Each structure stands twice: as structure tokens, then as C-alpha cells.
Image: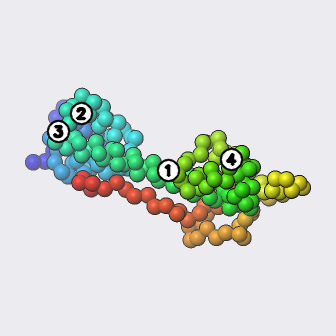
């Protein structure tokens, strides 16, 4: 039987993101697999968005039964996948900043006030640096200076020129708004898969 909404200013054929809370609850409680898959896809597209938040509100007062545990898992998996992709993006940016600076990893770490081993954890994605440290990394990569202790003046070439001949960033090479080269991604984000996929 096709899903229908009563006393709701929406139609089940409308995008899930446009359904009011009551429509979403109706789809969870009385919908079928096709409806739940649409909800799952909306959660995958925006793990912290209004559909996921409305589902969480519903789960707060409803006992888990039927499709509820699967939708809870859908939210958790989507958020985990998004967080992994975000960590990978930060790790890729750290690697690009080190390369663009023209400095050795040791010198770059000293310039940003951390250790080479800690910098490696940022570049691998094992640990994400604080936002303020990323700003510092961008600043250091933006102006190539001498290694600490060598003296001399800083070479104020823009970051887009620094290290450009030292590293190829692969087929997806581009330039960010801040002039930094964009490396080809090392990490691939996996979309969460489960019974609703």
C-alpha cells in the first residue's frame, strides 16, 4: 500500500527534506522499504541535517521497534563516514601545506610549534590539528623562509609558487582560494552501507 499523509501539508512524493515532522513520523511508522530507503538517503546526504535531527527527536520518545533501529544505525553510520572523510580532507591539506612550504617536515614542525612525530599524526589523519594550528600551517606555507637556525631573509613567494616544481599533485590538481595546490585525495570516503542501501 502506498504511503499517504493525512492533515499534513506535504505529499509523500515530495523530497524527504521537505516533509514536516509529522510526515516523517508517518513514513517511519506506516511506510514501506522504498520510503525508508528515501529517508536513509536523505540522512546519508546530510548526517546532521533536519531529517536526521527530526528522527533523533522521534527516537527520544519512541521505543525502538520495526525500522527504528535500522534508521538509528543509518544516522550513526552516516556520521561516522562523514567524520572519516573530514579527517581525511584535513590530513590531505596538512600534507599539501608541508609540500607547498618547501620546508622539510622537521623544519615545518618547528615553524608551527610542534614535533615532527606530531606533524606525522596530522598528515596521516590519525589526529586532527586544532583549527588555530591549521591557520598557522597555512601562514607558514604561504611564505617560504629559511630553515630555523640558518639565518637569512624569508623568501616571500606566494604559496602557489612554492614547491610547485617539487611535487606533482596528480590529475585533480587545482588551486584553492588561498592559492594552495589541491592534491589528489589519498583517502576515499566510503558511504555507509547497510540493509537500507
**Which residue was labeled with disc 3?**
65
Residue 66 position by quadrant: top left
Q: Do the numbered discs 3 and 4 sit on residues whose CB atoms are within 8 Å?
A: no
Secondary structure beneath dot 3 equals loop
Point 68% across, 49% down: residue: 115
Residue 134 tag number: none
Secondary structure beneath dot 4 equals loop
Q: Is residue 72 above or below residue 121?
A: above
Q: Nearer the viewer, mark 3 or mark 4?
A: 4
Q: Residues within 10 Å of mark 1 (few under 14, many from 20)?
A: some
Residue 114 tag number: 4
**Which residue was labeled with disc 2?**
22
What's the distance in space between the residues labelled 3 and 4, CA to CA? 50 Å
What's the distance in space between the residues labelled 2 and 3, CA to CA? 18 Å
Point 75% across, 49% down: residue: 111
Point 9% across, 48% down: residue: 1
What's the distance in space between the residues labelled 3 and 1, CA to CA? 32 Å
Looking at the image, is mark 2 or mark 1 earlier in the sequence?
Answer: 2
Looking at the image, is mark 2 or mark 3 earlier in the sequence?
Answer: 2
Looking at the image, is mark 4 or mark 1 earlier in the sequence?
Answer: 1
What's the distance in space between the residues labelled 2 and 1, CA to CA? 32 Å
What's the distance in space between the residues labelled 4 and 1, CA to CA? 22 Å
Q: Residues within 10 Å of mark 3 (few under 14, many from 20)?
A: few
Residue 164 shows up from this direction: yes
Tell me where residue 22 appears, x and y as whole percent: 23, 33
Q: Nearer the viewer, mark 2 or mark 4?
A: 4
What's the distance in space between the residues labelled 2 and 4, CA to CA? 51 Å
Looking at the image, is mark 3 or mark 1 earlier in the sequence?
Answer: 3
Q: Residues within 10 Å of mark 4 (few under 14, many from 20)?
A: some
Name the outermost residue toward the top.
61
Residue 86 tag number: 1
Looking at the image, is mark 2 or mark 4 earlier in the sequence?
Answer: 2
Amino acid at each position: 500500500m502506498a504511503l499517504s499523509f493525512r492533515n499534513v501539508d506535504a505529499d509523500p512524493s515530495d523530497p524527504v527534506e521537505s516533509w514536516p515532522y509529522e510526515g516523517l513520523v508517518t513514513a517511519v511508522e506506516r511506510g514501506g522499504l522504498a520510503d525508508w530507503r528515501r529517508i536513509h538517503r536523505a540522512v546519508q546526504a546530510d548526517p546532521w541535517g533536519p531529517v536526521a535531527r527530526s528522527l533523533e527527536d522521534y527516537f527520544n520518545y519512541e521505543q525502538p521497534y520495526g525500522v527504528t533501529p535500522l534508521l538509528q544505525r543509518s544516522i550513526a553510520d552516516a556520521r561516522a563516514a562523514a567524520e572519516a572523510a573530514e579527517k581525511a580532507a584535513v590530513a590531505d591539506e596538512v600534507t599539501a601545506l608541508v609540500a607547498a612550504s618547501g620546508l622539510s617536515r622537521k623544519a615545518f614542525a618547528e615553524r608551527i610549534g610542534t614535533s615532527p612525530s606530531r606533524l606525522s599524526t596530522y598528515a596521516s589523519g590519525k589526529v586532527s590539528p586544532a583549527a588555530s594550528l591549521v591557520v598557522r600551517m597555512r601562514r607558514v606555507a604561504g611564505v617560504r623562509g629559511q630553515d630555523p637556525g640558518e639565518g637569512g631573509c624569508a623568501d616571500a613567494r606566494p604559496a602557489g609558487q612554492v614547491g610547485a616544481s617539487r611535487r606533482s599533485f596528480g590529475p585533480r590538481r587545482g588551486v584553492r582560494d588561498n592559492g594552495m595546490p589541491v592534491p589528489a585525495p589519498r583517502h576515499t570516503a566510503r558511504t555507509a552501507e547497510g540493509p537500507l542501501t
